[in-house]
Image (cartoon, rainbow, N blue to C red):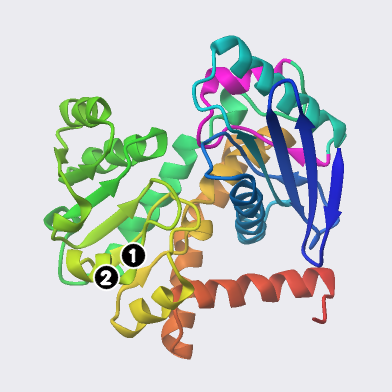
Amino acid sequence: MKYYSDNHNEVFLFEHEKLDCCCIITRSKKFDLPGLGGTRFVSYTHFQAACDSSKALATSMLLKNTIADIPFTGAKQVIYCNNTSLTKTKRNAILLFSADCVNSLQGGFITGTDMGLSADDVSLMAQYSPYILANESGYTCYDTAVGIVQSLLVMSKQIFPNKQIADLRLLVQGAGQVGAYVVKMLRGENIPIFIYELDKNKAIKICNQYGAISVADVSSFKGDIFIPCAREHSVYYDLVKKMGVMIIAGAANNQLLTENDDVRFAAEGIFYAPDYVINSGGAIHAAAGYLGWSDSQRLEKISMIPQKLQEIYKMSLLNKIGTSAAAKQYIWKRIKLTTHDKE
């Protein structure tokens, strides 16, 4: 193991020469608490990109865990492997190596599924580590979607006071596990949904199941609400303006292409729901599973997400700043009060 530390994070690098892979665990130093965050296993163009992603995602988890009021600091594991066509045997060996890396921190990092890992993958890993959340405790997608949909129902009334949400046009980008639940829940409210999904078979399945309408290109969609549930940096000013939407609220992490987009959205009256706020239902679910909270405790914390978004929206209007900037002010103030950080 190699260990690096800076002013913000601890980075643990675990290399496995025979498997030609590296597990990167980044944990924020802001709280003297175990880190909570998922394990991601996707392709990166190079090693440094994987390291940068791990750091950025750990920071997002710090913000998310803080605003969700759960007793963990932010953390993330990224599995980096150059081989994009792994056999099942080698893939499983990498997953078990990842579990060993988690164990080496002796409870300093609690993890579960993220992009690139299936429920079966995490179940396999959890057989070798008590710090990996699997089965019901590790299945965070549903509660992530609950927080998003509850927030959408509340914020749509605020942004569109003279319209019913069923009369609005909504686009979900990415019909993965969270995106599919968002579509299902919104269709349960009798709200028409458009989806954009690169996997054509997945798109067809979602459309057939829930009566959603598939679009060929995100930029061709014209509507009111954009729900990004795909990979990071998928939200940027030119795209949003072309779509004409007034609400951006989805599950993807690190959605904004640049922080300047947050400023531009605010100037145009476009409401952006910071991802680490609106998608925090999954972190709450994971914390509840690990700490043994009751269903009522878990659901109460999730139900607070829309209220926190409303507070952040009011702050952004009052101070004439973007919602992302307002959310960070809100969260960092809480962090400084807790840690007595005078920086």
Q: In this view, does 71 lie above or below 105?
A: below
Return the x and y of residue 161 as percentages of the image width and height: 21, 72
Q: What element carries label 2?
A: helix
First reached walking from the N terminus: tag 2 or tag 1: 1
Return the x and y of residue 188 as percentages of the image width and height: 24, 38
Q: How crowded is mark 2: few (under 14 residues within 10 Å), some or many (20 or more)?
A: few
Residue 33 shown left or right of residue 301 in the figure: right
Tell me if I can see residue 189 in this picture.
no
Magenta-drawn stretch contains 166 = no
Residue shown at 48% from the left, 51% from the top? 279
In the rendered structure, find residue 311 and report the number of the disc placed on it. Answer: none
Residues at marks 2 and 1, CA–CA distance in whole angstroms: 23 Å
The image quarter in which residue 342 lies: bottom right
Q: Is residue 258 above or below residue 321?
A: above
* Residue nearer the viewer, 332 or 143: 332
In the rendered structure, find residue 155 and report the number of the disc placed on it. Answer: 1
Residue shown at 35% from the left, 36% from the top? 181
In the rendered structure, find residue 238 and report the number of the disc placed on it. Answer: 2
Count the labels in the image: 2
